[in-house]
Amino acid sequence: MKTDQELKDIVKSKYSEIALQDKETNMSSCCGAGGCSTEVYNIMSEDYDTLNGYNPDADLGLGCGLPTQFAKIKAGDVVVDLGSGAGNDCFVARHETGETGKVIGIDFTPAMIDRARENAEKRGFNNVEFRQGDIEQMPITSNVADVIVSNCVLNLVPNKDGVFKEIFRVLKPGGHFSISDVVLKGALPAGLQTDAEMYAGCVAGAIQKDTYLGMIFNNGFQNVTIQKEKPIVIPDDILVNYLSKDEIDSFKNGNTGIFSVTVYAEKPANACVPGSGCC
């Protein structure tokens, strides 16, 4: 079992490589983690083409949902995107929040921050900024965000409960989040659970759906809603790198399911975070 720091180092290394790749290369792999498929499979990502504010240059094909579509962003909102990558969801959020709002992207990987800043500067987006940091310890003060979004990122973080605590801290009372992520129903085969590539590929780091939702409830959020859910199918030419034929057959015919879910939840309007100054 790798330590939390070893897992973070794997993610930082893989996503530094991904930052230099194009969307087509990323989409032909396990959530961009490596060239492990012999054909181009759109394994998890969804089509952003119909969303206003979409910029193809900022889309690396790494998501597993469309959280900004469901995020109920209003003009003037402060929006924070966790794991902002090249800026894709930030730019969609900017269209919704308008010139009077502000969008802050946080990413763990310096190469991603550089690419996102370049994309923002090309478009003259002065109310979009990108900060390098760990979403387990966000470089943002408490009670500032109206909306938090994230797309296929929390499954990469060892301490998911810590991230939900940080989301609660950073949201304003009455604020909300819309997060797309990968969750499980049933146990993954050991070959998928322990492989670093599958961890960076958004699968091995996923946890049980009930556990995931339980963390949200236990951290004080209310009105928790699944806005969208879809199954994720891993192609055989990827599975063969990690499992035997018998294991693949057992996995495909068993009770294990891998799902993309988009979850909405609200911080209570009467909430107060100790030490934030609101009490």
Image: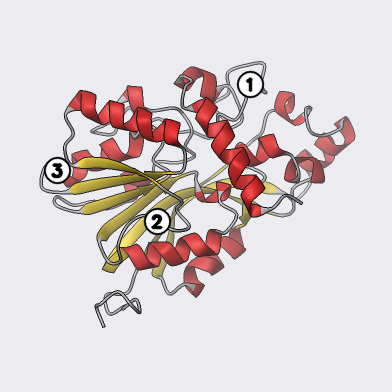
Q: Nearer the viewer, mark 2 or mark 3?
A: 2
What's the residue at 25%, 59% (across, down)? 146
Q: Give the mark nearer the N terminus: 2 vs 1.
A: 1
For the residue labelled by badge 2, is the local secondary structure a helix, a strand or a loop? loop
Q: Position of residue 240 (x, y in %)?
A: 79, 27
Q: Give the mark nearer the N terminus: 2 vs 3.
A: 3
For the residue labelled by badge 1, is the local secondary structure a helix, a strand or a loop? loop
Scheme of image coloration: secondary structure
Disc 3 marks a residue whose amino acid type is Gly
Q: Which residue is mark 2?
A: 138
Cα distance, mark 2 to mark 1?
31 Å
Report whether 107 appears left or right of 199: left
Report whether 175 appears left or right of 135: left
On the question of residue 152 being in view, the answer is yes
Q: Position of residue 15 (x, y in %)?
A: 52, 33
Disc 1 marks a residue whose amino acid type is Gly
For the residue labelled by badge 3, is the local secondary structure a helix, a strand or a loop? loop
Taking depth in this image into account, of 164 and 8 the one nearest to the observer is: 8
Q: Position of residue 22 (x, y in %)?
A: 46, 19
What's the residue at 36%, 28% (across, down)? 115
Q: Which residue is mark 3?
A: 98
Disc 2 marks a residue whose amino acid type is Met
Dot 2 surroundings within 10 Å: few (below 14), some, or many (20 or more)? some
Q: Which residue is mark 1?
A: 35
What's the residue at 14%, 50% (across, down)? 75
